[in-house]
Each structure stands twice: as structure tokens, then as C-alpha cells.
Image (cartoon, helix red, strand yellow):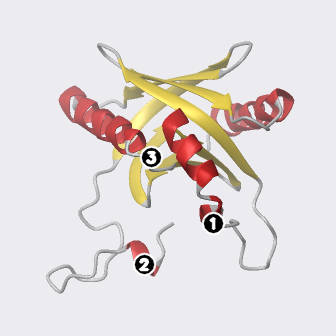
Amino acid sequence: MMNAMQMPMNNAMPMMPMMGMPMMMATMTCKMTDEAMMCTMKPAAGMDMAMFKNNAEMMAMMMNCGMPMMMQCANMSMMCMSEDGMAMMNSMSTMNMPMMMPMGMPMPMMKCVMECKMEADCMTCKMMPMPGMSMDMMNNCCMLMMKMMNDCAMPMMMSCNGMPMMCCTC
């Protein structure tokens, strides 16, 4: 979730995390292809399509700015970036902050390259493993994520640069 540094510290806003944060409920279906995982997100029942579109566009714009997008489901997190963002990250190696759990246990962390595009009634995201990550590992992570979401009905949270974006269920 958020750390204190990411909270805007203005006096008008009481320190309530997630206050006034846009949060979309979306339904998501994922399928594996040979070299990538394709996710299709649609607004959940009762959610406004126009609102979803705006949110999805905002997400795509944030990713274009090189902001990492975190997808978290249970204890598994995936960090996705656009290809340009990845290239930028790799050149600034000081930014590779290890995600540490409080106990000092590293979190399983998948880094992948993600492309999002809006379609008429949904958003499709294509996730590919970043250079240096094995496709098998990506496959395993995707299978786990699909298992968690489909069979175990766990929601997946997506946040971009600390800002909660969507909560996806199947």
C-alpha cells in the first residue's frame, strides 16, 4: 500500500489514506498466449463505462510516463511497466529498490512489460516478461494469479505509483 512519502501532505486533506482516490471495480479475464498474458478488463456491474474509460486512459497515460504499475493478488505482486519505462529503469539502476517484507523476507516479485490499449467496451493489457526473466516463470506466475482470482475468488488490486486504480475480480 502507500507509504508516507506518497501521501500528498496538504493540510486540507486529513490523513486518511485512500480518501477521494478513484477506485474502479472491474472484472478481468486472463488468458495465456505463447509469449504473453492477455488480460481483458471490463467495468464491473453498476460501474459507469465512461468512468472506466477515463480511468483506463489515465492508467495508460501514467504508464507512458514511466510509472510502474503494481498488480497485487494475495501475497503475489507483479510490477508492470511500459517498454520505455523499463529502459529508463534499467539505465537508472539506483531505483531498483528491493521490495522487502517487514520480516525481511523478500516478496515474490514479477517484473513484466505491459502494454495497455482501450477498446470499445473494455481495456486489454498485454503482459510480457521483461528481458532477463524466463517465460516459464512468467507462466507460473500467471497461472497462480489466474488460480487465485478464478478458483479462489481473490480480488486483485492494481495501483499505479501508489495510487489505487482498480480492483479486479472475475
User: What residue sits 28% from the left and 52% below the top?
Assistant: 22
- Disc 3 vs disc 2: which is toward the camera? 3
- Nearest the viewer among 146 and 46 is 146
SS at circle 2: helix
- Residue at label 2? 5
Q: Is residue 67 left or right of residue 35?
A: left
Whether tag 2 and tag 1 are in contact, CB under 8 A, the answer is no
Whether tag 1 and tag 3 are in contact, CB under 8 A, the answer is no
Where is residue 145? Give x, y as percent. 69, 37
Where is residue 10? Give x, y as percent. 20, 82
- Disc 1 vs disc 3: which is toward the camera? 1
Q: Is residue 8 left or right of residue 97?
A: left
- The mark nearer the N terminus, 3 or 2, is 2
- Residue at label 3? 66
Compared to 163, does 143 lie above or below?
above
Q: CA distance from mark 3 to mark 2?
A: 19 Å
Where is residue 74? Give x, y as percent. 66, 53
Q: Residue furthest left?
A: 12
Compared to 56, does 117 lie above or below?
above
- Residue at label 1? 94
| Kind of residue sitting beneath label 3 | Gly
- The mark nearer the N terminus, 2 or 1, is 2
